[in-house]
Amino acid sequence: MKELKIESTLYVFDSLQDVPQDIKNLMNHAVKARNKAYAPYSKFNVGAAILLDNDEIISGSNQENAAYPSSLCAERTAIYFAGAKYPEAKMLKMAITAASQNNLTDKPIPPCGACRQAISEYEVNQNKPIEIYFMGEMGKVIKSNSISDLLPFVFDRSAL
Ligand code: THU
């Protein structure tokens, strides 16, 4: 038996003030999207914004449903919209922010497993890593250089 060790490195910024200017701008788009979230059930608003290589920014928010499992996370709303609107464009960077309607969200909120899988599909297809930055409504910002650092040992098309 051999041991297979998988290592990821993430980068932590103390606050949004410390990230590069283009990421502040992208995060501001994510905040604007977050403020338009439809989250009457969880009361947890999430916004995501994606910078494309054609300089467009596509954003999205979580959209909930009375039939709870029919809801969709912000990250997938944004990434499916980007894929639908600009199928030829590569996705360069993604910013994610979350804010509870009930209490202050001051910890970075990472994308859920299903969103990681969805982001990975696009990263694998475009053969270029997608930088991901995520935060709460304030506080630390975490950067991942690639979705593969958040979802190692992914199931992808190469298995089929
Ligand atoms: N949510 C997202 O939008 N993105 C995530 O990665 C985690 C969860 C949403 C789904 C649901 O509307 C609410 O946050 C609470 O789970």
Image: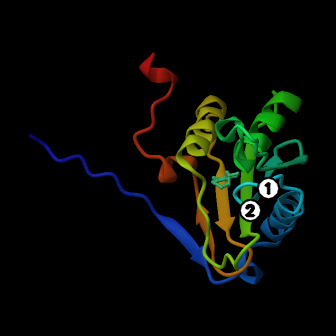
Q: Amino acid at mark 2?
A: Lys
Q: Is residue 119 above or below residue 111?
A: above
Quadrant of the image occupied by residue 97: bottom right
Instruction: Give the secondary structure at mark 1.
Output: loop
Q: Residue at x 79, y 44 (%)?
A: 78
- Quadrant housing the C terminus: top left
**As displayed, is residue 42 above or below residue 78?**
below
- Distance (Cα) linking label 1 and label 2: 5 Å
Observer-nearest residue: 116 or 157?
A: 116
Query: Residue at 79% across / 46% down in the picture?
Result: 63
Determine whether the beta carbon of the residue marked 1 sits less than 8 angstroms from the nearest atom of ligand 1. no
Q: Considering the numbered disc 2 on the image, is that residue within a helix, a strand or a loop?
A: loop
Q: On the rendered image, what quadrant is the N terminus found in? A: top left
Q: Quadrant of residue 88?
A: top right
Q: Which residue is label 1 attached to?
A: 40
> Within 10 Å of the Cα at label 1, are there few (<14), some (14-19), or many (20+) other Cα atoms?
few
Mark 2 CB within 8 Å of ligand 1: no
The reply to whether dot 1 and dot 2 touch (C-beta < 8 Å) is yes
Residue 114 % position (x, y): 57, 41
**Image coords of residue 6 (percent x, y):** 33, 51
Q: Residue furthest top?
A: 160
**Left or right: 41 with respect to 60?**
left
- Residue designated by label 2: 43
Q: Give coordinates of residue 64: x percent, y percent.
A: 76, 45
Q: Is residue 38 left or right of residue 95?
A: right
The foreground one among 62 and 75 is: 62
Q: Residue at x 78, y 66 (%)?
A: 23
